[in-house]
Image (spheres, grey):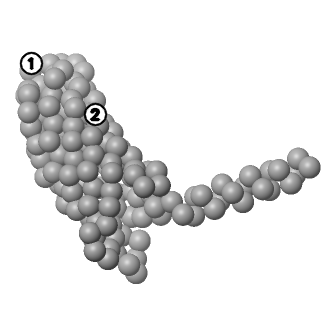
């Protein structure tokens, strides 16, 4: 009976995993001095969670992690839209911790024959906790080009 339960659990788990459309890749660009970010998207059925880990190219070694909950939809065929809200936590070397509220709005294209996704998005943010010497305060935004492998 125990073996049957384990096999049944594995089959159900594999079925959920095979329907998921997770993606991993890179986002380029951005405002507030952000350079490239490692990007991961976790499918949550109708919506998803995006996690981005990056470093600022203009500030004093500002590392950050953004977590954005996104609603998504289809415009036509393989072209879709997404809209999200979240938070950004960062650390500025020699200056301390930073925190921001972020939004995100964008378009994405999923290639039908290869597991590749290309996106273009804008991410406005409001930095409400950031050390004085790190370079960013208040409202900012950036546009990014994302390239991700879907699995």
Q: Residue at x 8, y 28 (%)?
A: 138
Do the residues bearing badges 2 and 1 touch, measured as CB atoms within 8 Å? no
Secondary structure of the residue carrying tag 1 is helix
Q: Name above or below for residue 29 compared with residue 109.
A: above
**Residue 63, how many percent across, how many down?**
25, 34
**Residue 139, how many percent across, how many down?**
8, 33
Q: Name above or below for residue 34 compared with residue 87.
A: below
Question: What numbered label is drawn on residue 132?
Answer: 1
Q: Residue at x 22, y 19 (%)?
A: 96
Which picture quadrant has residue 10?
bottom right
Question: What numbered label is drawn on residue 87?
Answer: 2
Q: Classify residue 77 as left or right of residue 43.
A: left
Which picture quadrant has residue 136?
top left
**Which label sits in the foreground, 2 or 1?**
2
Which one is earlier in the sequence, the residue at label 2 or at label 1?
A: 2
Looking at the image, which is closer to me, 29 or 104?
104
- The answer to whether residue 39 is seen in the rendering is no
């Amino acid at each position: 009976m125990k073996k049957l339960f384990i096999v049944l659990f594995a089959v159900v788990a594999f079925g959920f995993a095979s329907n998921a459309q997770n993606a991993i890749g890179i986002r380029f660009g951005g405002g507030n001095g952000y350079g490239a970010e490692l990007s991961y998207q976790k499918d949550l059925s109708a919506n998803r969670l995006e996690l981005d880990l990056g470093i600022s190219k203009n500030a004093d070694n500002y590392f950050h992690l953004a977590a954005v909950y996104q609603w998504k939809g289809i415009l036509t065929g393989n072209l879709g839209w997404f809209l999200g809200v979240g938070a950004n936590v960062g650390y500025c070397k020699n200056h301390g911790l930073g925190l921001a509220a972020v939004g995100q709005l964008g378009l994405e294209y999923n290639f039908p024959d290869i597991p590749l996704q290309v996106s273009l998005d804008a991410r406005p943010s409001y930095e409400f906790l950031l050390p004085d010497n790190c370079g960013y305060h208040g409202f900012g935004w950036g546009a990014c080009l994302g390239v991700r492998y879907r699995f």
